[in-house]
Amino acid sequence: MRPPYTVVLIVPTGIGAAIGGYAGDALPVARAIAQVADRLITHPNVLNGAQLYWPLSNTFYVEGYGLDQFAAHRWGLRPVHQNRIGLVLDQGIESELRLRQLQAADAVRATLGLTLTDYIVTDAPLGVQLQTGASGATWGTIQNPDSLLRAAEQLIQRAKAEAIAVVARFPDDPGSEALQAYRHGHGVDPLAGAEAVISHLVVRHFAIPCAHAPALPPLPLDPVLSPKAAAEELGYTFLPSVLAGLSRAPQFVQHPAPGDIWSQEVNALIAPANACGSSALLHLSQSPALIITVNDNQTRMQASPEAMGIEAIQVESYLEALGVLVAHQAGIDIAALSPKLKPLQPLSQNSD
């Protein structure tokens, strides 16, 4: 019996990816790969679609820092039946907007049957600040990270939370050029980089699944809104997809047990062609895993496989990447699918 065919899908956040740079617009890619792979490992940026999500029984929702640790073979992934999710709310969220988040949490309890602990409000406003780098990629800082860590620790120790959802108040900037470009389908998500900072902090300190949803007031209607940005315009909160993902997120482990997943079991990794600088990709490129890069998923980065010294199969689209996965899983050399096949060549004798 062959081992499960395992694929990692990476679309780094906050770098303006043409596919995966918006709210859940890489989810169709994940759904397609999940039909080919026995196991798909990917991260919240791919699977979160604000209030939209799609249950995939063979897909593992792994926060970015945890994915880096997994790829480096420091942590394994332990599948779970269900997680108890603790909810952290930023003290900086206004009372009405806070109530909207709590109602969303209650909705997923009543409608999806998810298990949440009692929530906690941070003892100080988190103070999220947004930044944009020279490349156009976005990132951010938190003025009071200790307040976030204290809140998460309370949920873990007192409420026995097994995963943490964070809702932080993000700055309002409805009239900015960057936001308008994003809403019209040709900009960089101004929130994504800061969201990654928040979840990384919790996962790094507690080795527990975590994901973040920003708290923002609704934006004014835009009649020329891009379909790629439309998922973020559906309501008052992005929390539902985060809670759905965390409910089945694998736990991080450091000591192997039967059923755990470790990086040496990864058969293939797929990433944008000019965003090959992530820690997870660099680590897995040193393993036997097949690296596939997708040219038409352009980003603001300039980290090609050649520039990073990575051997990769470069394809034009995710449709072509799916074909490579099918052949690889079947044990077929993709060269055999081309019209011309070069004959075998003699191996030169080693002079040593």
Image (spheres, helix red, strand yellow):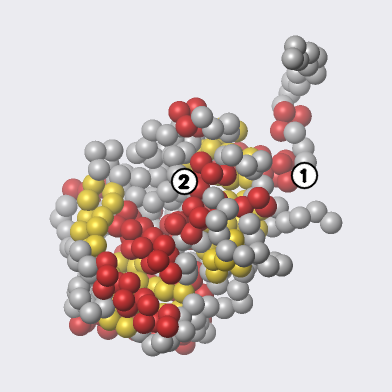
Residue 348 vertical placement versus 255 (above, below): above
- In percent of width and height, residue 61 lies at 52, 63
| Nearer the observer, 266 or 153 | 153
Q: Which mark is residue 41?
A: none
Q: Is residue 168 left or right of residue 84?
A: left
| Nearer the observer, 268 or 73 | 73
Q: Earlier in the sequence, mark 1 or mark 2?
A: 2
Write the residue at 51% across / 61% down: 62
Please say if the residues under marks 1 and 2 sit with CB atoms less than 8 Å apart.
no
| Nearer the observer, 208 or 84 | 208
| Nearer the observer, 126 or 220 | 126
For the N terminus, the image quarter is bottom right
Q: Is residue 113 left or right of residue 219?
A: right
Q: Amino acid at mark 2?
A: Ser
In the picture of the structure, the residue carrying the numbered disc 2 is: 279
For the C terminus, the image quarter is top right
Q: State the CA–CA distance, disc 1 to disc 2.
A: 29 Å
- Judged by depth in the image, the label closer to the viewer, 1 or 2, is 2
Q: Amino acid at mark 1?
A: Ala
Secondary structure beneath disc 2? helix
In the picture of the structure, the residue carrying the numbered disc 1 is: 330
- In percent of width and height, residue 31 lies at 58, 57
Write the residue at 77% across / 37% down: 332
Q: Residue furthest front?
A: 352
- In percent of width and height, residue 13 lies at 39, 51
- In percent of width and height, residue 187 lies at 29, 46
Q: Residue furthest right?
A: 1
Residue 257 vertical placement versus 120 (above, below): above
Secondary structure beneath disc 1? loop
Residue 86 visible in the displayed image: yes
